Image (cartoon, rainbow, N blue to C red):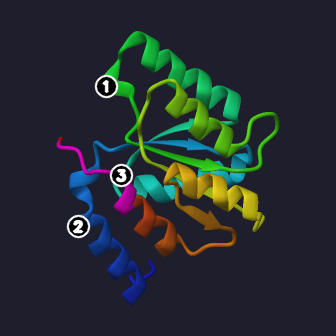
């Protein structure tokens, strides 16, 4: 049996301090299955609930259905989306969300340092996280953007 390392103990302590956010729902939009699974796992390990969408179309449909149906219990508290996806970009998802009257914070992930993307994100008040990134950087942004919700 492996003994816990200092890093494991630090992660456990961090996870315990984040327990109050466990009702916070993150809508994770990522077309790469492995990346989506990894990010979802990290978010769950840090106490967040995760709804996954495999592309921008699916995310927009999910949010539109919630907005139309008024089901606030399934409304995400944070939108975490990749930028480059087939058909609908991450920025398109964020803009469509806001246009539908759904105002939730968003974080945009991109592997491409495109000035136009950064400018559009800035205009929306959306932070951009560039790949490759450290998980600690991601979680710092998530904690800043996602308001804790009670149990």
Q: Find the distance from the CA under tag 3 to the CA under tag 2.
A: 15 Å
Q: CA distance from mark 1 to mark 3?
A: 16 Å
> Is 33 or 73 nearer to us in this picture?
73
Query: Does 28 sit above or below residue 138?
Result: above
Return the residue at label 2: 17
The dot on residue 124 is none
SS for tag 2?
Answer: helix
Q: Position of residue 14 (x, y in %)?
A: 30, 72
Q: CA distance from mark 1 to mark 2?
A: 24 Å
Residue 112 position within the rendered picture, expressed as x and y whole percent measured from the top left? 78, 64
Image-based side of 80 in relation to 141, left or right: right
Please indicate, yes or no, whether residue 39 appears anywhere in the rendered image.
yes
Mark carried by residue 146: 3
Residue 148 forms part of the magenta stretch = yes
Asked whether the residues under the numbered discs 1 and 3 touch, taking CB atoms below 8 Å apart as contact, a structural biologist would say no
* Residue located 73% across and 43% down the image: 31
Residue 142 drawn above or below residue 56: below
The residue that label 1 is drawn on is 73
Residue at the farthest left position: 150
Can I make out residue 111 in this image? no
Residue numbers of the magenta segment = 143-150
């Amino acid at each position: 049996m492996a003994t816990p390392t200092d890093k494991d103990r630090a992660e456990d302590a961090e996870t315990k301090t984040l327990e109050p956010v466990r009702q916070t729902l993150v809508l994770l939009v990522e077309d790469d299955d492995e990346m989506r699974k990894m990010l979802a796992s990290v978010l769950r390990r840090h106490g967040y609930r995760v709804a996954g969408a495999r592309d921008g179309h699916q995310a927009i449909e999910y949010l539109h259905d919630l907005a139309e149906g008024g089901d606030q219990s399934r409304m995400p508290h944070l939108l975490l989306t990749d930028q480059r996806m087939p058909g609908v970009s991450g920025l398109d998802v964020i803009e469509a969300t806001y246009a539908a009257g759904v105002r939730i914070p968003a974080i945009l992930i991109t592997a491409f340092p495109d000035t136009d993307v950064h400018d559009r994100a800035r205009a929306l008040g959306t932070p951009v996280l560039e790949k490759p990134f450290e998980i600690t950087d991601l979680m710092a942004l998530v904690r800043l953007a996602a308001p804790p919700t009670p149990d």
